[in-house]
Image: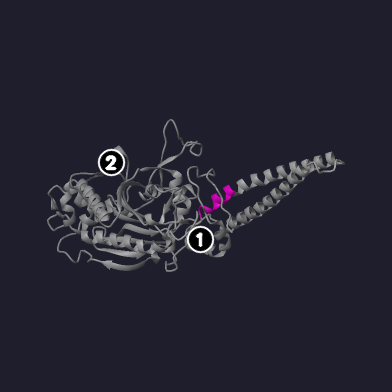
Amino acid sequence: SSKRLTLATSQPFKFLCPHLNYKKFRDNATSIAQNIRNRNVKNVDVYRVAQLYNEFCDITTEMNSLRNKRNEIAKSIKNLSSPSSSSSNLSEERVSLQNQGRKLKELIYQKESRLVEIEQLLLQEAIHIPNDTHPDVPIGDESKARVLKQIGKQLTRESVNFPIKDHMTIANKHDLIDLESAANVTGTSWYYLRNAGALLELALIQYAIQKAIYKGFTPIITPDAIRTEFSHACGFNPRTQENAQNYFLSTSISDSASNHNLSSPRLMLSATAEIPLAGIYAGKILLESQLPIKMVGFGRAFRAESGARGADTRGIYRVHQFSKVELFALTRPEDGEIVFDEIIALQEEILNDLGLCFRLLDMPTEELGANAFRKYDIEAWMPGRDSWGEISSASNCTDYQSRRLNIRYRPVSTTGTSTEFVYTLNGTAVAVPRIIIAIMENFQTSDGKVIIPQVLRQWMGGLDTIG
């Protein structure tokens, strides 16, 4: 049977106790190595994990044998002290047994010390092994994405009798976005939303949350700062600094660039509300009757992305901070696919009601990240950019996150203390800036105005058009 490792004190986890399935990694090393190659994940060695786990099992067996011998010696010493024991040579035999016991104690201590080292090495290596992959997922990079459906009609330069403008041209005309002031106050790729632009954000947030509540999701406003290990546990854990896209927090009291690995918990700005939503149930055992748990969270997403060029750098398409409404669910394993489909259906309904043209894509292996078993992206048509732009995604993470966050449930059918890991699923309800881009560019008129989608107007202060 698989050995359970308790790693609460192992770096980088101080507050969580991951329960990774090392036996599975060892027994399926060949197929897992192929999965790692398919995902193009670097610096991850499942064979090293298998080697360490074998050593862990061997040392555990040796320790059990040594403990049994030590117990036998202790029993022999006790028998020597009994009244029925012969007195001849008792002293010498007792001393000999005591010496053997001391040697065994020292040997056991050495084995235990090595076991702790192996546990830490196992976690450090295995934590980066990505999730399994659904067999229908296309293999390859972004170009291999499979378009599953397209909804709505594309607005093109040929389909209208006026020049199509991009979102920044429209925003500048109506004073909706202020990049210049944000560049002075914060830096490039930060922005102010103004006037109807600000109202559009608030309207989109209200609309998405109300739709999700109607579908049975519990509304939650999350903290935007999280402990780094919660981000790592959710699968946002790059192995190289070049891939890190996070903003970290420090104070004069706690963290600094030089001591962030020490006892003070390091905080970071969350890249998605998915992380604090998942963290709510970290370390908890749920009842089966509580599942599924469906939450809709509002938070700010922070991305220290760099290297984008061309159209991605214009306006608010690729920014360092944006508001996002996130869907998140915990389910029984057998309900994972059902709730995944529910999340995607809700995403489609939101975009349909807004009147946008969009398409659903089954994302290939290299786009799954570490945590997703399967991932669907939704792209909206953005005529001002004359291209599709990603506006949301949905992921089935199976037990990848729940094992790292230690979120379990107790099935009704089991007796005693048996538990299983939940499945986690997530999806974007609205990522505000890109939805604003799609609205501005798709609903522009020949006289330079923007028609506000009907479903948003109740939160727009009486406006039905911008301009």
- The residue singled out by tag 2 in the image is 182
Q: Report crowding for label 1: few under 14, some 14 to 19, many 20 or more residues within 10 A (C-alpha).
A: many
Report the number of discs: 2
Q: Is residue 37 left or right of residue 70?
A: left
Is residue 89 visible to us here?
yes
How many neighbours does mark 2 have within 10 angstroms: few (below 14), some (14-19), or many (20 or more)? some
130 versus 9 height, above or below? below
Relative height, residue 458 to residue 382 (above, below): above
Return the x and y of residue 92 as percentages of the image width and height.
84, 40
- Label 2 residue SS: helix
The earlier-in-sequence mark between 1 and 2 is: 1
**Quarter where residue 83 is shown:** top right
Please name the predominant secondary structure of the magenta segment in the image. Answer: helix
Look at 25% across and 58% down and name the residue there.
350
Asked if residue 26 lies left or right of residue 208, the reply is right
Q: Residue at x 67, y 47 (%)?
A: 111
Q: Where is residue 19 in the image (x, y as percent from the top left)?
A: 51, 52
Q: What stretch is highlighted in magenta?
A: 119-128
Q: Which residue is drawn at 48% across and 43% down?
A: 15
**Residue 456 within the magenta-colored segment of the rendering:** no
- Would you name the residue on which mark 1 appears? 36
Q: What amino acid type should be assigned to the residue bearing mark 2?
A: Ala
Q: Residue at x 27, y 44 (%)?
A: 191
Residue 25 on image: x %, y %: 55, 59
Mark 1: which amino acid? Ile
Mark 1–mark 2 CB contact (< 8 Å): no
Can you see residue 453?
Answer: no
**The N terminus, quarter of image:** bottom right
Which residue is more in the foreground, 383 or 275? 275
Q: Where is residue 271 in the image (x, y as percent from the top left)?
A: 37, 48
Residue closer to the observer: 76 or 290: 76
Q: Is-magenta flag for residue 122? A: yes
